[in-house]
Image (tube, grey):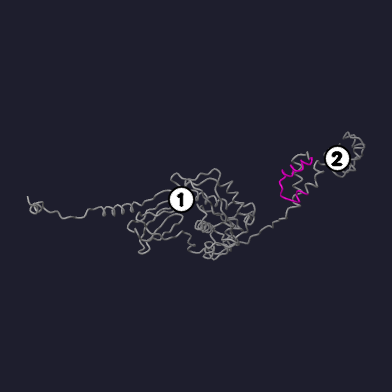
Amino acid sequence: MVGVEQWAEIRRMHFVEGLGIKEIGRRTGRDRKTIRRALRCDRPPCYRRPPRPSKLEPFREEIDRLLGSDPRMPGKRIRELIEELGYRGGKTILDDSLRELRPRYLPRRTFQRTIYRPGELCQFDLFEPREPVAVGHGQMRRGWVVTAELGYSRALAGALVFSKGAPDLLWGMSRCLSRLGALPEKLVWDREGAIHAGGGRPSEEFAGFCGQLATGWLILEPADPQSKGALERSHRFMRTNFEPGRRFCSELDFQAQLDRWTERANARTHRTIRAVPAERLAEERGRMGALPEPMPQTERRFVTRVSQQPYLRFDTNDYSLDARLAGRRVDVTVSQRELLAVALDTGELACRHRRSFAKGLTFTDPAHQAQLERLRGSRRREPEVERRPLERYDRLIPA
């Protein structure tokens, strides 16, 4: 059989150089019949094996019947069933055949390419780090990252939180929007518990947050991650590029490293949009609304009464209060960074503590401890009692 290279050389010598068959045979060492076949063939020669019937052929009808009854039936189960009927073929030819046949029976699902207008959407989601985050006092705690990505520029931002409650998620959203520097038309979320109230409706906290920002929202359909596929791809990038090889000494260190990483990620050329997100973000900010000043309040607020043991318990930790306010009510505000309490009747400061995400600890302000000791000392003093001379009792009691 003539190889492709020699076939091409024979045709070149005949059609380009004008050589005859006898001369071509002398130069190539091929007989005249082989040269004539090469000249008649206008396609490169290739080896063709005669087709053989597949071992799967006698079982085609049974496979069609099984897929018709259950299009998602696993290939392993189909193989077990047709082996009972005498199939002795391998796994590979069955899998290849199922790969071609199964789409005929499955409901068709196609996706169109999504194009975002500048400032139209900002996708939000939760990313869970593989390892717990150090929170001090030798403790580690499970955390989540509220992630945000603008649809047009693909600019990314993130904020670390330690619960999925509405105050923490709304704080994370507020921080992400502040990092992005402007306000899109709609905020996109999946059906997260603190965001979704059921039936595609937003929770009161989320609706109130969007109302204060004067922006819209979009709650996605269940089990539809493709609707925020841009952010899903960024999560995979975080998993493979941000997490490996990093160590975090505290939650603040985690957030600082995450901020620096997102800045570098936004400065790279994005493979999908073939542009730099930071450059497109500058363009997109001109189409988005300005962030309000101040941003919506996302702190936890509640009222409690100072007990006789002047401590406030929050998130399993005890924080000291001013002992002089025992029995009075205080307004407590808990943010991501501090815990603040103020007396309701007089406005006196009851406490100001740095919030800790470690658990089961007690934090006592030295000033509160000193005040408590002064109050206890004043209660321990003995009452003044008149001391009379013993001679008076001698006169009253006869000898």
Query: Quick one: label 1, few (<14), some, or many (20+) residues within 10 Å?
Result: many
Task: Determine which of the numbered discs, if any, sits on residue 357 in the image.
Answer: 1
Give the image location of residue 130, x and y in percent. Answer: 55, 46
Question: Which tag, 1 or 2, sits closer to the chain's start?
Answer: 2
The range drawn in magenta is 65-86
Query: Would you say the residues marked 1 and 2 are in contact, meaning their CB atoms lie under 8 Å apart?
Result: no
Query: Quick one: label 2, few (<14), some, or many (20+) residues within 10 Å?
Result: few
Camera-side residue of 131 and 82: 82
Camera-side residue of 234 and 134: 134
Q: Nearer the viewer, mark 1 or mark 2?
A: 1
Q: CA distance from mark 1 to mark 2?
A: 72 Å
Task: Determine the secondary structure under disc 2.
Answer: loop
Our reading of the magenta stretch's main secondary structure is helix
Give the image location of residue 234, x and y in percent. Answer: 60, 51
**Residue of label 2:** 50
Question: Which kind of residue does numbered mark 2 sit on?
Answer: Pro
Question: Which kind of residue does numbered mark 1 sit on?
Answer: Phe
Camera-side residue of 9 and 139: 139
Quadrant location of the N terminus in the rendered image: top right
